[in-house]
Image (cartoon, helix red, strand yellow):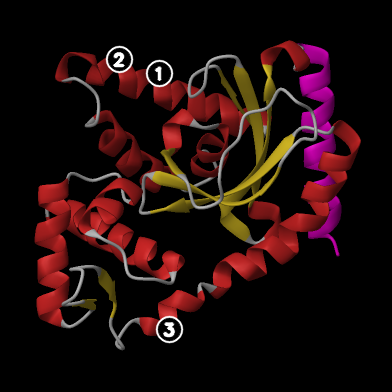
Amino acid sequence: MTIAVLDKAFSILEVLARSGRALSLSELAEESRQPKPSTFRILRSLRDLGYVEQTEERGTYCLSDRLRSLREYGRDEALREKALPIMQVIHKEYDETVNLGVLEGSIYIRYAHVLETTQALRWIVKPGARDAFHTTALGRAIVAQLPSIQIDRLIPKVAAMQPASQRKAFRERLAAELSLTKSRGWALEEEETVSGVACVAVSLEPLGEPLAAISVSAPVMRFPKARREELVHSLIDLVGQNAKK
């Protein structure tokens, strides 16, 4: 229980750091994907400890001086510098949406940067948006490369989000998917998050960023198996080339 509360508290702090502005209780609950009552209790504790400040006028929350340095969020900038050359090559060659994702708050993927396709039919995701890692190719690509002890800890966490009667089967499916992802070196998600959209992803672990990955998302009709495999090989080769620089 204590670990779960810490995960939730740090998720809220990360949202505040990323936003760079005061946020309402509703905004924080939505951005951190947590119920309002839980968010309120955690914010009250963080405020009492001096890590969060609450404005009197609107009742919004922001980081205190003790944690203000987190608002720089310099990690994203350094990560983008490493990933952008790869993303730009893939975007130019295939003209599909290219995403940079980071594992955040232990079970979530946050989109740190997005290069959108110029084609009319697209799936739009905004930087800063979050999804549970198991629902995305980005998340699967990252988690599959983590040490087995971490994987064994994460699978039950996301399984707990499922109905009790489905948890055992869910754990088995996710473990099998992560094992397959690790063995082939890339992740696939097809119409599981958004109907009609497929994604492939590759971990940036070779670049020294084990908690980050690059994915390409496209409508299924533009993503046949042959093109998908060609794109994956291009991604893997580019990551490898950049890792040697």
What secondary structure is the stretch in magenta mostly built from?
helix
Label 3 residue SS:
helix
State whether residue 238 is above or below residue 43: above
How far apart are labels 3 and 1 at the CA level?
Answer: 40 Å
Three-letter amino acid code at the position of disc 2? Ala
Stretch in magenta: 225-245
Residue shown at 24% from the left, 31% from the top: 161
Badges 2 and 3: C-beta atoms under 8 Å apart?
A: no
Q: Considering only vertical position in the picture, is 149 above or below 194?
A: below
Residue 33, how many percent across, how many down? 30, 44
| Circle count | 3
Residue for badge 3:
69
Looking at the picture, which amino acid does disc 3 mark?
Ser
Q: Is residue 214 left or right of residue 24?
A: right
Instruction: Residue under label 1, please give it.
Output: 173
**Front disc: 3 or 1:** 3
Q: Is residue 119 left or right of residue 100?
A: right
Could you say which quadrant of the image residue 59 lies in? bottom left
In this view, the residue in front, 204 or 145, is 204
Q: Secondary structure at mark 2?
A: helix
> Which quadrant of the view contains residue 138?
top right
- Disc 1 crowd rating (10 Å Cα; few below 14, some 14-19, many 20+) is few
Q: Residue furthest front?
A: 57
Q: Is residue 233 magenta?
A: yes
Question: For this rendering, which residue is in front, 9 or 172?
Answer: 9
User: How far apart in space, not on screen, are marks 1 and 2 (Cα)?
Assistant: 6 Å
The residue labelled by disc 2 is 169
Q: Nearer the viewer, residue 112 or 141?
A: 112
